[in-house]
């Protein structure tokens, strides 16, 4: 039985379809795995269904939602420890490296969770998150400004992540390929029709924080712009862009 408080986006209620839409993109995975260096043991915090876990190292996953933990099992991955980032049940320096992918914006205390990761990790801590100052760099700024405002409010600033991790930190932009197989919002920069599909939006937690009824308004706004040809006139060039540098960042901390 899961006795931990539910995350603010309730993955136990709304995360059932997650692993169908949110998968490891091999190009982003390669970047993450390089940053893990030669670590043999890796901790994955906020592991969800296990995306981006390296298969050639020992991985221990921590995940608070029982629905997300069950999806790992269904995918043939090892079980995860039930836990929360802010109290990691491991000794100091227990892991060679650790990772936290697309999860810190869900944590109740980001600074504490990242300090915990630093505490239990001897080598690199690798975090993938979104730079709230860069959410408006592509066309969703015109069609979904209310959604980006929600994202901006809940996403920790890059300097908070760096300061909480300490050590030598580096912030590296992630280039998103147009055929990205992980279904976060920016993955669809060149495939706007995807946002019309409920299952795509259900695996992007920001939509659930909009006031009642607003999701339909935003989707309708985009649908009309696609049907009228307005979107393609203004933004059709995104369809043939091979990749885009948006708001996604890898933040890596190595000990001093
Ligand atoms: C968007 S999913 C990312 C999952 C996975 N890392 C991935 O890349 O697919 C966010 C995950 O953070 C988890 N999470 C929420 N609150 C957490 C907390 N306090 N500590 C650790 N993980 C948490 C959620 O349960 C969910 O599985």
Image (cartoon, rainbow, N blue to C red):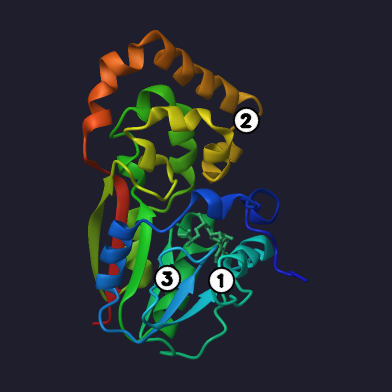
SS for tag 1?
A: loop
Estimate how packed mark 1 is, as few (under 14), some (14 to 19) or many (20 or more) residues with alpha carbons within 10 Å: few
**Where in the figure is residue 203, as x and y percent of width and height?**
54, 46
Q: Residue at point 59% right, 70% down?
A: 84
Estimate how packed mark 3 is, as few (under 14), some (14 to 19) or many (20 or more) residues with alpha carbons within 10 Å: many
Disc number lying in front (2 or 3): 3
Position above or below: 98 against 72: below
Camera-side residue: 175 or 75? 75
Q: Classify residue 143 as left or right of residue 136.
A: right
**Where in the figure is residue 233, as x and y percent of width and height?**
27, 14
Estimate how packed mark 2 is, as few (under 14), some (14 to 19) or many (20 or more) residues with alpha carbons within 10 Å: few
Residue at label 1? 76
Disc number lying in front (1 or 2): 1
Residue at label 3? 53
Position above or below: 174 against 31: above
Q: Residue at point 42% right, 70% down?
A: 53
Disc ID at residue 211: 2
**Rendered image quadrant of residue 245:** top left
Q: CA distance from mark 2 to mark 3?
A: 34 Å
**Where in the figure is residue 14, as x and y percent of width and height?**
66, 48
Q: Earlier in the sequence, mark 1 or mark 3?
A: 3
Q: Earlier in the sequence, mark 1 or mark 2?
A: 1
Camera-side residue: 75 or 133? 75
């Amino acid at each position: 039985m899961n006795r931990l408080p539910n995350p603010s986006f309730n993955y136990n209620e709304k995360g059932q379809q997650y692993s169908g839409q949110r998968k490891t993109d091999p190009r982003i995975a390669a970047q993450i795995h390089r940053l893990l260096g030669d670590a043999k043991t890796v901790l994955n915090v906020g592991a969800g269904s296990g995306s981006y876990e390296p298969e050639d190292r020992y991985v221990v996953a921590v995940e608070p939602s029982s629905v997300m933990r069950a999806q790992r099992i269904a995918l043939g991955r090892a079980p995860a420890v039930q836990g929360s980032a802010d109290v990691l049940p491991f000794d100091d320096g227990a892991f060679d490296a650790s990772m936290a992918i697309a999860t810190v914006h869900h944590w109740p205390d980001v600074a504490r969770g990242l300090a915990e990761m630093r505490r239990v990790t001897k080598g690199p801590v690798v975090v993938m998150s979104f730079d709230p100052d860069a959410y408006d760099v592509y066309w969703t700024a015109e069609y979904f400004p209310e959604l980006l405002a929600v994202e901006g409010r809940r996403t920790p600033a890059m300097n908070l992540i760096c300061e909480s991790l300490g050590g030598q930190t580096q912030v590296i932009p992630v280039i998103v390929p147009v055929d990205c197989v992980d279904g976060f919002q920016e993955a669809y920069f060149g495939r706007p029709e995807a946002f019309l599909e409920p299952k795509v939006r259900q695996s992007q937690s920001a939509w659930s924080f909009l006031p009642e009824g607003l999701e339909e308004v935003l989707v309708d706004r985009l649908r009309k712009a696609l049907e009228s040809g307005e979107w393609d006139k203004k933004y059709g060039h995104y369809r043939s862009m091979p990749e885009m540098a948006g708001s996604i960042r890898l933040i890596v901390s190595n000990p001093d």
